[in-house]
Image (tube, rainbow, N blue to C red):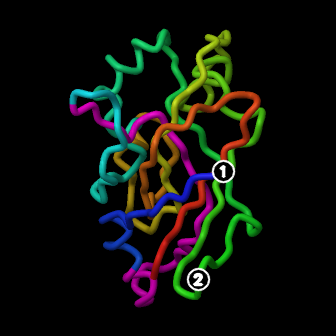
Amino acid sequence: MAQVVATVTNVARQYWPQFFGGIATPWTPQFTYFKIGRGGWINPGGGPVPRIADPTLQDLDVIQNTSRYLPNIGTEGAGPGNIYYWKNALIGANFSFATPTTLQIRCILDFGQFNDIQGVPSSPPGGPVLSPSGTNPQLWELGIFSAPPPGYTSPTASAGNPNLLMVVYGTFAAETKTVAAQLENDCLITF
């Protein structure tokens, strides 16, 4: 289990006060999904390391900045149609308080989820099912999402990604997902 200290995104800082002030209605900004992805790292010369969580992102780094990762992801033996991220719904059991001012959100990839960079319906959803590549994904980043507020459109929605508001974003040391591993990343948000 990794603990991910989340950074509140700038776009969430823009819209959430409107909700609490009763300006953005009707809108219920409950956390509904998490996405975990293959981006969120840089290579300063000695190999990949997690990048500092960027609050200006409005979707996972690998989705919003796909071209930055393509040359490196491609060297892992993957071809067109690679799966760059996985999205899971959050349920009530995923939420607890680590302290009175810290919300803990359990983001779990189960044994049968995202074990191959191919072999599942391609991203965006609705694509063909690809033959398994035999390559397990390395995951570096996590985002927590809510429904979008009125008037907001994610910059990645035009590429077929869901129109969601990324509220928090975090990066962590690489985790390799395999069929033998259930990954749990606990996202911590301090108020």
Spatial CA span between label 2 and label 1: 19 Å
The outermost residue toward the left is 45
Question: How many numbered badges does the structure rendering display?
Answer: 2
Q: Up-down: is 46 above or below 147?
A: above
Could you say which disc has been placed on residue 99 in the image? 2
Query: On the picture, is 172 further left or further right than 123?
Result: left
Instruction: Look at the image and say whether residue 24 sits in the magenta stretch.
Output: yes
x, y percent for residue 37: 50, 39
Residue 82 on the magenta segment: no
User: For residue 183, what is the image quadrant?
Assistant: top right
Rendered location of residue 117, percent (x, y): 58, 22
Judging by the rendered image, the residue that carries numbered circle 1 is 184
> Viewed as shown, does residue 82 lie left or right of 70?
right
| Mark 1: secondary structure | strand
Number of residues whose C-alpha sits closer than 10 Å to that of mark 1, classed few (under 14), some (14–19) or many (20 or more): some
Under circle 2, the secondary element is strand
Which residue does the image show at 49% across and 12% down from the upper left? 78
In the picture, measured across the screen, residue 111 lies left or right of residue 138, that is right
Q: What amino acid type is highlighted by mark number 1?
A: Glu
Q: Residue at x 76, y 67 (%)?
A: 93
Give percent across and percent down for residue 143: 48, 53
* Residue 147 image point, x, y percent: 54, 62
Quarter of the image containing the C terminus?
bottom left
Residue 1 or residue 151, whichever sits in front: 1
Q: Residue at x 35, y 30 (%)?
A: 66
- Identified by mark 2, the residue type is Thr
Q: Residue 51 — which label?
A: none
Residue 8: name its quadrant: bottom left
- Which residue occupies the foreground of this view, 55 or 50? 50
**Residue at the limit of the structure toward the front, as seen here:** 46
Magenta-drawn segment? 17-44
Task: Tell me what residue is drawn at x 50 percent, y 30 percent.
Answer: 84
